[in-house]
Image: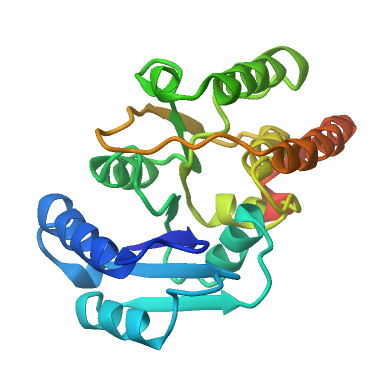
Amino acid sequence: MILDLVIPFYNPKQGWEQKLARRFTTLTDEHFGGDKHLINVIIVNDGSRDRFGETEIAYLRQHIPHLKVVSYVENKGKGHALRCGVAEALTSYCIYSDNDFPFGLGVIREMYNTLQQGADIVTGRRTRGNYFSHLPFKRKVISKGLAFVNRFILRLPVSDTQAGIKGFNRLGRKLFLQTTTERFLFDMEFILLAGRVTGIRIQEIDVNVVAGTEMTDFSRKVMQQEFRNLIRILLKKKNGKQSRKDII
């Protein structure tokens, strides 16, 4: 195996396991020479109430040679789910993606190649593509606001923190596991932590939304939770620098 692929799920739609199996086959056939043994797939059940049982897992095991399933009863949020999945990674390189693969499959190979070339962390950059044209109005305003915070307040090393796909090596993995945000702003916290490490290599890859991707809006409850998380992350800005050797 050369790569861990972590994918979180919460109350997936009927037939999700068949879609995942087809996408995995397409990913390996088109971008990894048809070798299904190269990728260790880690799926995380973030407290789903149904459609995530033994039948679905048995189907996936027939189509994905290396499959790890992490599951717990209570819904904790995407940040928590991904930390649980990343903690189970086995290889030197790890990539996580939303389960609908909104930026396609080729970006996974592109991120892997970039990591092999020496990047510690690779992030998706949506600002130069078609992403914002697909968003509902409220979510577009929030995304633009977060981009302003990233650039002018936190002064982060990348322009976009919230794309749902990132990759990292073992150094990046240790940093990712230091995050504590349970839901969506864990990405911002991760890049904030990474930006304090002297000499870290962070690279951005432009991504575009593929046809058929659904963009849902945020509920008021989620917005309130994320506002509290944003304040907590902003307070972390005062923390000092680290060196690579402090982490490795």
Give percent across and percent down for residue 243: 72, 42
Q: Is residue 199 left or right of residue 37?
A: right
Confirm whether residue 48 shows in the render. Answer: yes
Question: At 69% from the left edge and 53% from the top edge, which residue is drawn?
Answer: 247
Tally the numbered discs.
0
Task: Give whichever of 17, 169 is nearer the camera.
Answer: 17
Where the C terminus falls, by quadrant? bottom right
For residue 187, what is the image quadrant? top right
Q: Is residue 37 left or right of residue 184?
A: left
Q: Is residue 209 above or below residue 176?
A: above
Task: Give whichever of 129, 31 is nearer the camera.
Answer: 129
Confirm whether residue 1 shows in the render. Answer: no
Give percent across and percent down for residue 35: 14, 67
Question: At 45% from the left edge and 19% from the top edge, which residue is drawn?
Answer: 132
For residue 55, what is the image quadrant? bottom left
Colour treatment of the image: rainbow
Task: Give whichever of 150, 194 is nearer the camera.
Answer: 150
Give percent across and percent down for residue 88: 53, 72
For residue 134, what is the image quadrant? top left
Q: Is residue 81 left or right of residue 225?
A: left
Question: At 10% from the left edge and 62% from the top edge, which residue is drawn?
Answer: 34
Question: At 66% from the left edge and 42% from the top edge, which residue is drawn?
Answer: 190
Q: Is residue 32 above or below residue 117?
A: below
